[in-house]
Image (cartoon, coloured by chain):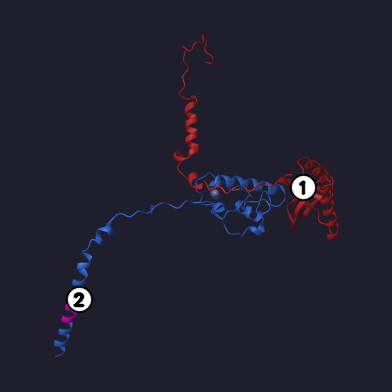
Amino acid sequence: MALLKSLILRNAFLITHRALVSTIRPSSNASVVEDDDAPVEMENPFKKERVQCILCKLNITPDYKNYRLLSQFQSPYTGRIYGRHVTGLCKSKQALVEAEIRKAQNCGYMPYYYKDKTFLKDPKLFDPENPIRSHRF
Amino acid sequence: MPSYELALMLRAMPKGELKKTLTRISHAIFNRGGIIRNIENLGFREMPYKTSSHGLVHREANYFVFKIDTATQAVADLKEENSRDVDIIRQRVFKVQEDKQHLSCTLPEELLPPAYRAEVQKMIEVGKTQVNRFTYKFKYNSGLDYYPFQK
Ligand SMILES: [Zn+2]
């Protein structure tokens, strides 16, 4: 008896399922389909985003009084100013940074041959071990 | 009157003397028809390198920045007067950089391979107009009746 009941139930389900499918089909046959498949005007989705250097992105103009920022572009071992291939700055910003570091060093804000020890744990803006272009140092 | 920044290092001294020194410096500016826009105190701290001035070695200094507007011809005069001041260890005068309109970053153009960079293309163009010293051969029928170089 129970088996028969379950069979009937399954049959009923199958019938309703078929009915559902049959009701859906005719509507999808309409002319709407052709419009959906037409090419759509849109921007190039694969276009790469324009990269910017960190100073341009944050809109920072380097200043000789802000020697803490400038010391981040200095080697902690020799005080040497890192080049453009390491810092990843654009040409104009790199030139500005270098000029301002020279000024700060001349004014006695920044050392020449080492980095201020209080700034040694500042966050790194770039990795000198992995420069953008290879170099001979 | 253009704007200048007068970056000063003053020797370590008590507050009263420091005040006197600052007023003396500002009066020197006012006497030459200058205006002080702002005086910035960057604090008293150890210098990154020792400096000797007026027969004394200094290892610490009071850092001050005067933002002034003054005639260009008065600047040399001011510097000369400050250089005679025994309280000033070092002074530098910088012209204030005007705020340039924010130009877009040229980094993407600089990261292109060399053949696509404008400056490299220009360099190649210039190179084409020059004589290649390695492949150039002197022509004996050039009109000169002698060989102009050492053989
Ligand atoms: Zn940039």
Q: Residue at x 49, y 34 (%)?
A: B122
Residue B47, image quadrant: bottom right
- Three-letter code for the amino acid on which mark 2 is drawn: His
A12 is within the stretch colored magenta:
yes
Q: Indicate the secondary structure of the residue bearing disc 1.
A: strand
Front residue of this view, candidates B25 and A104: B25
- Give the alpha-carbon distance from disc 2 to disc 1, as whole Å: 91 Å
Q: Residue at x 84, y 54 (%)?
A: B23
B88 is within the stretch colored magenta:
no
Q: Residue A41: x and y, percent? A: 35, 53
Q: Chain of mark 2?
A: A
Pointer 1: what residue? B91
Pointer 2: what residue? A17
Q: Chain of mark 1?
A: B
Residue B74 relative to residue A122: left or right: right
Front residue of this view, candidates A50 and B49: A50
Residue A94 relative to residue B44: left or right: left
